[in-house]
Image (cartoon, rainbow, N blue to C red):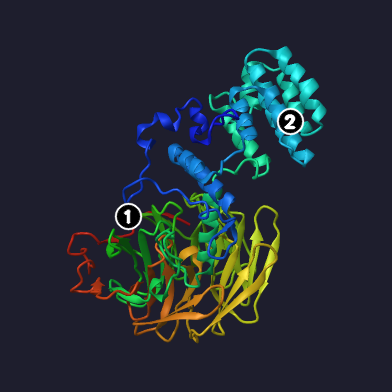
Amino acid sequence: MGGFEDDEPPSKRARASSVESATLSDIPCYSKPTNPLGGTMARPLTSQGKEVMVGSKGLIKRDEFVRIITKSLYTLGYEKTGAVLEEESGITLHSPPVNVFRKQVLDGNWDSAVVTLNALDLLDENIVKSAVFLLLEQKFFELLRNGNVMGAMKTLQSEISPLGINRKRVHEMASCLISSPQNVLVGFSKPGIESSNSRFKLLEELQKVLPPTIMVPERRLENLVEQALTVQREACYLHNSVDGLSLYIDHHCGRDQIPSQALQVLCAHRDEVWFLQFSNNGKYLASASNDKTAVIWKVDEDGELLLKHTLTGHEKPVMMVAWSPDDCQLLTCGMEEVIRRWDVESGECIHVYEKSGVGLLSCGWFPDGKQILSGLNDQSLCLWDLDGKQADCWEGQRSTKTSDFAVSKDGKLIISTSRDSAILLFNRDTKQERLIEEEHTVTSFSLSEDGDFLLVNLINEQIHLWNIRTDPIRVKRYTGHKRSRFVIRSCFGGSEQAFIASGSEDAKVYIWHRASGDVIETLSGHSGAVNCVSWNPTNPHMLASASDDHTIRIWGLKKATVKRRDAGSSSGSNGIHMNGSANGNGFVHQCNGSRSK
């Protein structure tokens, strides 16, 4: 945004990129402004539009409001409109001295710019010094880049050093005097210093230093609007919207944004479904069953789940599944048996992991996708390379027979059940061990997306939320669901993981508000215990539940008319018995991968 000399009217103002732009009188389309209703543009009467404060509560200063609107118009590229607003309101974006200062900066008149800056009557000497330092730093590098080493040295010694600030930067600039030009530009200059718009970048830096009354901060209006939207979103108790917040209306989410209606029933399993998990990209769902199979479902563009592969080969019930970080591979773990690694696209078994004389209980991936982790029934936790070579093993009381575990995204923190009522947080780098001590037996747990919170299911029909960022502290408790005999799993979910969902032995799915702990939905439909739930990580309106009734239910938003689809039954349109669905996908795959012992 360019500035002009004192005697030039505001109507000539344009962005800095067009200092030589024409005046409004040279632009025919603005010689006679009109309003949308026809006729000439309305101009405020002497007694109108001149209030010092505006807004329904009188909290907004009129001149500040107009200035940040003007600034936003220029930033958005509406130069002519911004100039008209300045002229019609009588409120200029910058004072004449500031316009002179900006033009001097853009023209590279550094000495004059320093004089003008000192004439702006800034009360804080530190601000003045910081701004002068930026001006002289630019002057120094331009002299150096143009080959004027003596001029640059003089500027550094007689103008920059006497300021007595930013000594580290001064030393870096001094070292530039004895470096080659390439080293000067690559090693020490600021980003963009050698580009044609480096002086525009300097103006942006000056805006951050100078008071906003002198130069309005960049994108101030956008920042204010974003703050207002953020406050509305945080105040929205049931926020779970997938659409962006609108500026036209105040934001509010109702219960209709919580997935609470069964949109699909998946019936491909022939026995109890114990575990399920959406892929990281939300495009697939994998389920594990007492029928010794695992199933991969694909989420199509319409949100309908289609059976992609039935994975067979386990000799015992499949306890759990785990998606690779890139969602291209899937692990399945048999009950005290082996782990199998599958290719998701082809459905072929790639590798079988087993340890002689020991049964495997759980499986998971390291964040780099190059190693897998498993809990064993000898109470050890083992790390494997993909080719089956054991990379590490932690023996002793690091896992119980119900061996859940989780790994942080950086791979440094391993979380596992230590004993019946305790969870171990083990840092691989520092070897530090921290414990979460519960009063009752831990049946399962899950880690939040940000890695800062752990959701712990207990045998006494409670779910506890722990903050594990530093020393573990319990921050919330959730109750209402039923558990007496089985392992029941819960999960984080919804927009920004603002909700908690859990299965229950009363054949229902429970949903709590994470922050308040209130039950906000109880979902009925299953006819057997609900063992596991999974919330789609990319679609806050999709929740899946696995039940002893042999089915998986897909929950979504309530609609006026919803036709329920049963997938995997004899009459299903997208399930299979042995050879896939009616549209040709969903083949059964027998594992024939390589084995590691």
Whether residue 572 is visible, yes or no, is yes
**Which dot, 1 or 2, sits closer to the camera?**
2
Q: Which residue is mark 1?
A: 348
Kind of residue at badge 1: Glu
Kind of residue at badge 2: Arg
Is 98 situated left or right of 41 in this image? right
Residue 18 screen position, x and y as percent = 48, 28
Residue 212 screen position, x and y as percent = 64, 45
- The picture quadrant where one finds residue 27 is top left
Q: Residues within 10 Å of mark 2 (few under 14, many from 20)?
A: few
Look at the picture and state if 166 lies above or below 326. Answer: above
Q: Which residue is mark 2?
A: 169
Q: CA distance from mark 1 to mark 2?
A: 59 Å
**Mark 2 element type:** helix
Whether residue 137 is visible, yes or no, is no
Report the residue at 59% width, 31% height from top. 191
Among numbered discs 1 and 2, the one appearing first in the sequence: 2
Q: Residues within 10 Å of mark 1 (few under 14, many from 20)?
A: many
Q: Nearer the viewer, residue 472 or 399?
A: 472
Report the residue at 42% width, 87% height from top. 506
- The picture quadrant where one finds residue 258 is bottom left
Report the residue at 82% width, 27% height from top. 162
Look at the picture and state if 31 lies above or below 487. Answer: above
Report the residue at 62% width, 38% height from top. 95
